[in-house]
Image (spheres, rainbow, N blue to C red):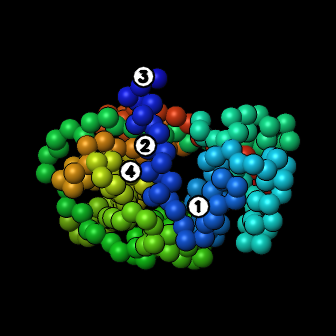
Amino acid sequence: MNTALQALALRAELAGLDASAPPQQTDIDGWLIRLSPGKAKRSRCINALRQGTLPLDDLLARCQRAFDAAGLPLAMRVTPWSQPPDLDKRLATKGWAAFDAADVMVLDTLAPQPAPAALQALDAPAYAALVGTLRGSSASAIAAHAERIANAPVAYQGFALNDAQGQLLACGQMVVAGDLVGLYDIASAVPRQGHGERLCRALLALARQQGATQAYLQVGSDNAVAQRLYGRLGFVFAYRYHYRSPETELV
C-alpha cells in the first residue's frame, strides 16, 4: 500500500469512529467501549485504540463487566491499528472466534458528477425506520439507530431515492467531515436494478458540492456484488477489519 493510500485509510478509520459514535460510550484504559443497544456492531463493541497500562486479562475483565451491565455480548473490533499489536493473535489463542469481516474502501478523488438525482431528505427517526424496515431490524434497534445518528459528533444526512410515483428505490446516508465523506447504510428496495449505484452517485455529487474531495465506505468482505458496484464508482480496497468474541451466539 502506498503512503497516500495508507494516510487515507487511517483518515477513513478515524472518521468512521466519529460517524458511528453512540451516546453510550466510554474509555477504559485507552480502549473505546461502545454500548449501544442498536443493531450495528460498530456501535456495540470495543475499539482497542491505545495500549494502556493494565494487563490484557484485567482489561478484558473490566470490559466484560461493562458489557454485562449493559446486557450486551462482549465483542472486539480488530483493525490494523488495534493495540496491543498482537491483540488479534492473543484473542484467537483465548478461543475468541473471528466473524463479520468487512472491507473499508476509499476513493482518492471525487470526480465531477452529472447533476445528482433528486433525493428525499429524511430526519433521523424517519431514516432509521426506513432502513431498519428494509433490514428487518427490531423496534429497539431502530430506535437506537435513530438515537445514534441524531447525536453523532458529525452531522448525519439521510436520503431516499424514489421513483416518479414516490415509491422507494434505495436509501442511504452520508457523513461529511471537512473534505472527507463517508457513505453508510446503502440499501436497495429493488435489488440488482442499478438503484444503489444511482443513489451513491447522487450522494457523492452532493458531498462534492459540500466540499468533500475524498470518500470512504465499509462493505462486507463476502459481498462481491456491492464491492463491484463500489469499484465502478472508483473505490479501492484500503484495509479489512473483523470482530472477535467469546460469545458463541455472535459468531
Q: Position of residue 226 (x, y in %)?
A: 44, 42
> Which of the two marks, 1 or 3, is nearer to us in this view?
3
Camera-side residue of 175 and 154? 154
Which residue is at a point 85% across and 49% down the rendered structure image?
Answer: 57
Query: How busy is the neighbourhood of tag 1: few (under 14 within 10 Å), some, or many (20 plus)?
Result: many
Q: Is residue 229 above or below residue 40?
A: above
Q: Tags 2 and 1 in contact by the CB under 8 Å rule?
A: no
Which residue carries the number 3 mark? 2
Camera-side residue of 42 and 126? 42
Q: Give residue 11's mark.
A: 2
Inter-mark Cα distance, 2 to 1: 19 Å
Which residue carries the number 4 mark? 182
Which residue carries the number 1 mark? 43
Q: Amino acid at mark 2?
A: Arg
- Disc 2 element: helix
Q: Amino acid at mark 3?
A: Asn
Query: How busy is the neighbourhood of tag 3: few (under 14 within 10 Å), some, or many (20 plus)?
Result: few
> Which of the two marks, 2 or 4, is nearer to us in this view?
2
Q: Give residue 248's mark.
A: none
Q: Amino acid at mark 1?
A: Ser
Of the residues under marks 2 and 4, which one precedes in the sequence? 2
